[in-house]
Amino acid sequence: MLLVLSDEHKEHLGFLPKVDPAVVGEFGRIAVEFLKKGSNPKIYEGAARKLNVPSETVQRGVEGLMYLLTESSKLMISEIDFQDSVLVLGFSEELNKLLLQLYLENRKEVRQILSELAPSLPHYRNLEWRFDVQLGSRALRQHVKPAICLKLHLESGGTQTARVLQTDPATLLHLIQELECALAEVKSNHCRRILRNIK
Amino acid sequence: MRFRFCGDLDCPDWVLAEISTLARISSVKMKLLCVQVIKDLLDEDIDYEKVSKLTSDAKFESGDIKASVAVLSFILSSAAKHDVDGESLSSELQQLGLPKEHTTGLCKSYEDKHAALQQKLKESSLRLGRLEVVNWRVDYTLSSSELKEVNEPVVQLRLQSQNPESGSSETSVVTVGAEKFRVLLTGMSIFFKYYYYYYY
């Protein structure tokens, strides 16, 4: 499938043929760095001074490259489709090859970064437990009541929370049974058929 | 095969795999590595420089160093958790393929610090809402806007405890009248009577 680039995007990328292919390679490397670690405006100014152009133009060029990379990696387009999409910009053969190489080398990493941006539910981090026996209370003396105290540590996007739960052994056994049923469901025919089709 | 130090369960596959990694360093270096790992388990600072120096002869990569520290941590803490004595641990580790000299070194370090490890594990067991500080003050109310002559003692308690879910400190201030305080104390003394009865 072809990537459709907006006019504004084409305008921003229009800066690239005006500079050396080596510089475009450098911009590509900066674009990938920014995708990994976040952008650093000082680099734009340094590059702008060296090339004698306003820093905004450099910024738009690099950001245009970043957007091109993320959109192509997101849709996982093939080589031919990428080449066709870039052809629209009317760049030289050498520049097209450079952009293609940039895309192919970094696509896996960009996809990994993009996967971390998806919303996530709190997930399991740690479970502490304690087995207690209540021997008596103010209201009733000399009874035996076992209880299991759980502290479930969860993590959701960097923040950690903890929930304290208490249960008796019978409920805990029931819980274990239900979870084992859930695990066994993966081995059922229905799930196996679906997994086979996904793979 | 069931192992006591794994809590009468099968030994995890990764432990089996990493025991062969441990066999690659000399037994003397392994004993020193054990000492460092025990320091880490007791929350004293582990000296990573020393660890990497000890493993440099056998040309361990960073993955191997992490694996050997992890497997020693597991063996030592799991053995302390299930209260395994040095002899049984030694025979079980030899069954798993750890050479005799290495096993002797490990078990010696384990036996030395066995009690300290168990104490540390006991302290880090789950505790909810730990009471940290109790401050008290007895005031004497002379008079109030409601009644001209009150003349009653009153106890003010400040309790600093740990929030069970977030672990941060919380302070609560409670004012208890004289009678209610006596009820509270009677309840507490009955509790202590039972405590001594069950514990001793």
Image (cartoon, rainbow, N blue to C red):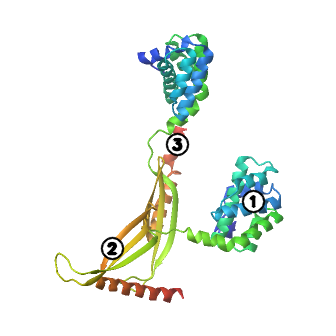
The quadrant in which the C terminus of chain A is found is top right
For badge 2, the amino acid type reads Val
Along the line of sight, the residue nearer the viewer: A165 or B177: B177
Q: Secondary structure at mark 3?
A: helix
Residue A102 on image: x %, y % = 59, 23
For badge 1, the amino acid type reads Leu
| Tag 3–tag 1 contact (CB < 8 Å) | no
- The residue wearing badge 3 is A195
- The residue wearing badge 2 is B174
Question: Distance between the Cα atoms at labels 3 and 2?
Answer: 60 Å
Query: At 58% across and 71% down in the image, what residue appears?
Result: B122
Using the rendered image of the protein, determine whether residue A108 is visible from the camera's viewpoint: yes
Query: At 80% across and 59% down in the image, what residue appears?
Result: B29
Q: Secondary structure at mark 1?
A: helix
Query: At 57% across and 23% down in the image, what residue appears?
Result: A28
- The residue wearing badge 1 is B33
